[in-house]
Structure formats: C-alpha cells, structure tokens
Amino acid sequence: MSLQLETDVLIIGGGLAGCWAAIAAAQAGADTILADKGYCGTSGVTATAGPNHWWVPPDPEKRAQAVSERNNRALGLADPRWMARIIDTTWRTLPTLADYYQHSITTDGVPHYQSLRGPEYLRALRRYAEAAGVRILDHSPALELLLHADGSVAGARGLRRQVNPPAGQDWTVRAGGVVLATGGCAFLSKLLGSRNNTGDGHLMAAEAGARLSGMEFSTYHTVAERHSTQTRSASYAFADYFDADGRQIDTGPDTDVTLPLARALLAGPVYATLARMPPDLRAILPQIQPAILLPFQRQGIDPFTQRFAITLHGEGTVRGTGGLRLADDDCQTDVPGLYAAGDAATRELIAGAVSGGGAQNSAWALSSGTWSGHAAASTARIQGRRAGEAADAIGGAGIRPRTAGGDGAALTHHLTQGVQAEMLPYDKILFRRAPVLTRSLDTLDALWREARDRLTPGTDVTTRVRAREAAALVACARWTTATALARGESRGLHRREDAPALDATLSHRLLSGGLDRTWVAADAGLAQAAVA
C-alpha cells in the first residue's frame, strides 16, 4: 500500500538549504513535510565539511565594500542586490540556531556564529526543524513532480527505501507549494558527500517546464589526496607540488591552481606536501576539519613532511554556479508554486562566473532556503493545497520508457559510464574546445534517446532510484555541454582553449533547457541591462 499525504509545503531534500527551507515554512505557519533521499541530518556535502558563512556586520560601508569586492570577481554576471540580500538574511537568521548548536565563543566573549562544524550543524538543523513541527521522511527520494492542469505544481511522488524492502513503498505528497533543495550534480565523481547529488531536481523541474542558468560554469575541481574523496581545499593553500621526477611544478601566480595541476596530471602522477602550513594551524586543523587527516593516518603518511599523490575531483554544479533559473526574489522557478534553493538553484546571482567559495555558498543555501520556505508557505496559504483537484505525474525518462525496455540495470550502468566519460576527463571539461564539445553533445544526445526510450525502472527500490538518477545525469550533462559550446569565450570557471579571452558581446547569462531537444538562449533581462 502506498503512502498518501497532504500538506501545505513539501521540501524535497534535507541538506543545508532544505532544512532552512523547512524551518522557514513551518515557522510561517505551514504544515510542512521534508522528504530526503538520505537521512536528514547527515545528508549532502555540508555534512562532511566545516562550513563558514559570508558574515558582514550591519555597517552600510562594510557591507557595500563586501558586495563590491565580490561583484568585481564575478565577471559581470552577478547581481549586487542579491549579494546584499544574502548578507542581511544570513546575519539575521544564523543566530536563531543557537538553541540547537553550541557555537564557539571568541576571546571577547562573542559567539562565533559564522563557522560551524558540518556534522553538528546538520544534526542541529534536524532538531530545529523537528522542534518547528516539520514531518521528515528519511530515505525517501522523490522521483517526479505532480502538476495541475494550469501548469502549477501539485506535489511529488517518490519511494520510501526502507519500507517493505526490496520493493520499497511508493509515496505521494500533495502540497500547495514545493521547494526543490536536491543539491547540485557532481556526476558521481566520488566527491565525499555527493553520492546523492545526481541532478534529480534539475530533471524534475525541467520536465515541468523550468529553465536553467549558468550550466556552463560547472567545472569546479578540488585537489585531494589521490585515494581520498575529501575535498577540503583550505589546507592546499599551503601546498607545494612535484612531478614524478621530483621537480617542483610551477603553478603560477594565481591562487587557483586547477589548470596547471590538471595539465600536470594529464602528463603523469603529481605529488604534494603541506610543509608550508604554519604550526599553529596544524595544531587546530583536526578541530576545523575533523576527518581531514584520516586518509593520511591510515596510510602512515605525514603530509607536513612527506610527499603524497594527489588528484582533482570534479564538483560539477555543487561548487559550480549552474542550476535552476530563479524567476523572482522568492526563488520561484518558471513553474508556479515550485521553488529552488541551495545548489539546485543557480548561484550566478551572487557569484557570477566563479564559484563564490564556501562562505558565500553556505550563505546562499541558508538564504535561498529561508526565502523559498517562506514563499512556499505564503503560496499555500493563499491558494490552498488544492488536493482535491486532478494532477498528473509528469516523470519521463527512467520512469516511463516510450518503447519496450531492456535490462534496466545494465542500461543504467551504460548511461552513467557514458556521462562520466564526457564530464570527468580533465581534457574535456577543463580545456574545452568546440570540436570536442560538439562530439560530446552528440554522444550525450544519443544517451538521452536511450534513456527516454528504453530505460525501464525495474521492480526493486534501488534500480528504480538508480534509473531515474541516470536519466538526470544525462540531462544535466547535455545542458552543461550545450551551454559550454554556446559560450564561445573564456569566463571564470568556463575555459575555452579555442577562445581564451573574454568576449564583451557575451556579458550575459545563458539560459538552457529542453529534454528531447536542448536549447540555449541569452538571458534577455541581463543582456538588456548590459547594453543599457
């Protein structure tokens, strides 16, 4: 028997943004359900990190300076007004966590709100959400959205993985407002905490008619010990790098060493040492990043005196800036009643063509979650749940194949491997060229046709979820590649070997979308503003 529920607001995703959205919706008086693909309180990339937040006191001069500095790095694609909004929302909202999280105290006796330990932060958010009255469905991935005949969102359907195994239990939640906080898409690059970040929300929203923005800026990579999935980059600010012959690698004057390291890794193994890290920082490193030294300890390596092999992990849209386009200040997508928060939404508004870094990204997750939760509650209050009205389930690829399907598990593996072959190699994603992008897009289009036509979901819960994930990976890879091909210049995270300079005629955001036929178009609003 399936689980049938009604609520005012449904939050899909239980990481940082999803928790803040659920808390905001519940505090606004909405009956709120949060459905998480994993276990809310441990989910997402934040749970493995030590997130800092963009933290600027309410001094007009300081805030204006902070916004100006960040905007200058964004290469023309950010919006200072949105930056100012997240600074203010983060300043006012983060201290409300104090009843559930023990913040450290500075020597002046002031709570140090902005820096938190990821595991404790996520546990605190769960307690905060539960105290606010949020109902949580753990291990309950959403598979597809429900739409009213007028195109507005009506809820979602999914699976409860730990009920009635191995088949699982279907769930349906009818809701007046839905927030997608499903995270980004890291293309299963083995980035710690990102296994569930397969672009599910991007696909569900696109099926409902939503557009995306900034998908070409999905190339962020982070250095890590070769056998580790941890991508905590701060330690590597003190790293020196060497090739297999022991020669030091010149990483240049830029603090971003991704490209020189990628070129070196394409030529052979690369080694690093953290010998330049100051002793006082070494001493407190385990407190800041509790798990950062474990891979070294298990291998008997002292990273401060010995060299160790490194790799670069791709983070896709997790620390890239692409995601669902936001149509208004409430983080509503192009679909009425459907909101996006955190890494599921584009961060171009606050970071432009660059990543933005952990502090800005955490502030974005908190703020976009808070705004979307409030707005979804307001939508439900004004329009009601509309649970008695007809609604259609709109999921396609990975749920309802157009022709007779084959071996779903085998095709899921084939699709996933195919996406990774186009999205993870350094020479394809970091050193882009038009002919290579064209071939990748042709390959990905063929994979989409296979997903659309033949991908059967299977009967057990795992194959059903994996099939849908594979379809989402293919969709995200196509939007990423199509926009990278359309942006014939190099700007921020997007680097074209065949167009290495900025092009003033491309100082606008690129929107993308479509399923059977992908498309890319200039964001008319910003393009007009740039011309003016």
Image: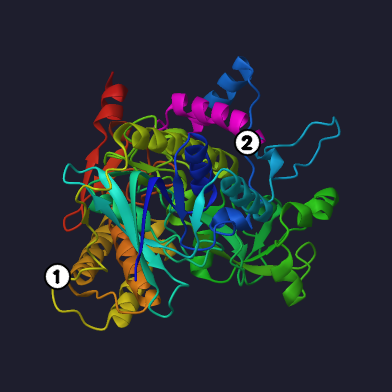
| Pick the front one: 490 or 281 | 281
Q: Pinpoint residue 421: horizontal percent, then vertical percent.
A: 36, 70
Which residue is label 2 attached to?
Answer: 94
Which amino acid lies under the numbered mark 2 shown in the image of this protein?
A: Leu
Q: Give the residue drawn at x 45%, y 60%.
A: 197
Please say which color scheme the image uses.
rainbow
Q: Tell me which amino acid carries mark 1.
A: Arg
69 relative to 330 in the view: left or right: right
Residues shaded magenta: 70-95
Q: Is residue 509 left or right of residue 269?
A: left
Residue lying at 70% horizontally and 40% vertically, measured from the top left: 99
Give the percent coordinates (x, y) of residue 119: 66, 56
Q: Quadrant of the C terminus?
A: top left
Residue 151 belongs to magenta span? no
Q: Where does label 1 land, which residue? A: 402
Q: Is residue 123 visible?
A: yes
Residue 345: give x, y in percent of width and height: 40, 44
Quarter of the N terminus within the rendering: bottom left
Q: Is residue 350 above or below residue 16?
A: above
Residue 341 at what x, y percent from top left?
A: 44, 43
The one nearer the camera, 130 or 276, is 130
- Per the image, label 1 sits on a secondary structure element best described as loop
User: Is residue 480 visible to the viewer in this orientation of the structure?
Assistant: no
Which numbered disc covers residue 192? Answer: none
Q: CA distance from mark 1 to mark 2?
A: 47 Å
Give the SS element for disc 2.
helix
- Closer to the chain start, of discs 1 and 2, is 2
Q: Is residue 270 left or right of residue 442?
A: right
